[in-house]
Image (cartoon, grey):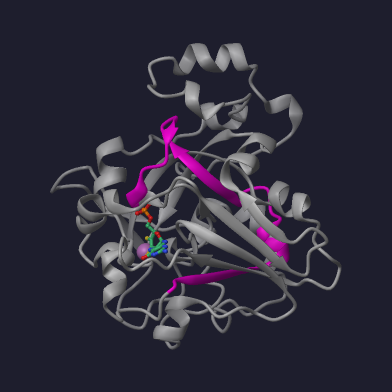
């Protein structure tokens, strides 16, 4: 179980801000992020070495900027991220346009070092900064009729040049069941390595759901809608036979065109060995309960 770690999110696990800053003071750009307390103890003990910053920010999937792994780092600088507004609507008590800066001022930004597994069978370990999605949903006041959360990426083809072609049905959309969205592992990331999240990684605000394939972690979000119907998702709309709504990492359920039993860590060079893929990407203890009684091969 070398790659497992347990995210025990109790207040006892929070490192005092001072100690945290001492450990992290080599990181540039922290001041502007308002990083608060953080880092569950379990993380320090975890056997996870974060991937290099350059790897995380230069090997990307963000089809709004092109389909090659290097395209987002080349083209995302065109994206205007200030000002940024997230519309929260649907089954909420407080619908409206939420300014990014206002959201941030109300949230606790933590560091979460997560394994990140793309459906294409490569992986990284990313030290995200962000806040729990649940805290934002609580701010909006989710109504009891809501069962799902739908997410939408910005549509701005002048700046997102990949949107000038109909590669996907733009804007990119994703969705979670409400209990998945409220799970403490589910975060909205605003940073990487203690710096503002780079545009190619989904600035200023992107979802991170570490037990699901990477495409669920939708970038540059402008709308969050609470609904009672399972929302459409971009890759399911494009190829339903290959990409389901759940998309939980599962080494036992192959993609129709390749095995999901192992993965290639990115950044280790040419001779990096593939490593076994873990059920729910290593977060089985935390999330398996969400899917009790479900056939995970059918609900892939
Ligand atoms: N809007 C949007 N979100 C997206 C994508 C995309 O093309 N557009 N690609 C997804 C896929 S396939 C992956 S693997 C991750 C990649 O995140 P990263 O570039 O930060 O590693 O973003 C996901 N979120
Ligand atoms: Mo992906």
User: In this picture, is 109 found above or below 178?
Assistant: above
Q: Position of residue 48 (x, y in %)?
A: 43, 36
Q: Is residue 124 left or right of residue 226?
A: left
Q: Nearer the viewer, residue 236 or 154?
A: 154
Q: Residue furthest right?
A: 144
User: In this picture, is 132 found above or below 13?
Assistant: below
Q: Nearer the viewer, residue 259 or 112?
A: 112
Asked whether residue 74 appears in the rendered view, the answer is yes
State yes or no: residue 58 in magenta: no
Q: Is residue 26 left or right of residue 141?
A: left
Q: Position of residue 268 (x, y in %)?
A: 22, 42
User: In this picture, is 257 found above or below 225?
Assistant: below
Q: Position of residue 169 (x, y in %)?
A: 40, 81
Q: Residue at x 76, y 49 (%)?
A: 139
Q: Residue at x 49, y 21 (%)?
A: 31
Q: How many marks?
A: 0
User: In this picture, is 170 found above or below 140?
Assistant: below
Q: Residue at x 46, y 23 (%)?
A: 30
Q: Nearer the viewer, residue 46 or 221?
A: 221
Q: Quadrant of ligand 2?
A: bottom left
The image quarter containing residue 168 is: bottom left
Q: Residue furthest left?
A: 270
Q: Residue at x 43, y 65 (%)?
A: 215
Q: Residue furthest bottom?
A: 241
Q: Position of residue 159 (x, y in %)?
A: 31, 60
For the record, the magenta segment spans 171-200
The image quarter containing residue 36 is: top right
State yes or no: residue 197 in magenta: yes
Asked whether residue 265 appears in the rendered view, the answer is no
């Amino acid at each position: 179980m070398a790659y497992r770690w347990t995210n025990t999110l109790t207040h006892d696990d929070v490192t005092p801000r001072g100690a945290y800053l001492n450990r992290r003071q080599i990181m540039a750009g922290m001041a502007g992020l308002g990083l608060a307390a953080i880092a569950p103890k379990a993380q320090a003990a975890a056997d996870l070495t974060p991937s290099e910053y350059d790897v995380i920010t230069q090997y990307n999937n963000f089809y709004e900027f092109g389909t090659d792994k290097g395209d987002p780092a080349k083209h995302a600088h065109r994206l205007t991220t200030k000002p940024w507004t997230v519309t929260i609507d649907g089954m909420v008590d407080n619908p409206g346009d939420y300014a990014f800066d206002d959201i941030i001022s109300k949230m606790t930004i933590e560091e979460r070092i997560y394994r990140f597994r793309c459906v294409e069978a490569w992986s990284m370990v990313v030290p995200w900064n962000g806040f729990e999605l649940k805290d934002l949903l609580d701010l909006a006041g989710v109504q009891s009729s809501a069962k799902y959360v739908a997410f939408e990426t910005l549509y701005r083809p002048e700046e997102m040049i990949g949107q000038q072609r109909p590669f996907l049905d733009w804007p990119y959309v994703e969705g979670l069941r409400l209990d998945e969205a409220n799970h403490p592992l589910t975060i909205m990331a605003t940073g990487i390595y203690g710096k503002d999240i780079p545009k190619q990684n989904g600035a200023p605000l992107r979802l991170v759901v570490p037990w699901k394939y990477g495409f669920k972690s939708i970038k540059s979000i402008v709308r969050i809608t609470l609904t009672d119907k399972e929302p459409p998702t971009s890759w399911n709309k494009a190829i339903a036979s290959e990409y389901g709504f759940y998309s939980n990492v599962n080494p036992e359920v192959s993609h129709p065109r390749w095995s999901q039993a192992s993965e290639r860590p990115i950044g280790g060079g040419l001779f990096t060995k593939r490593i076994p893929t873990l059920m729910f990407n290593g977060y089985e203890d935390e999330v398996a309960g969400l899917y009790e009684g479900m056939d995970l091969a059918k609900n892939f």
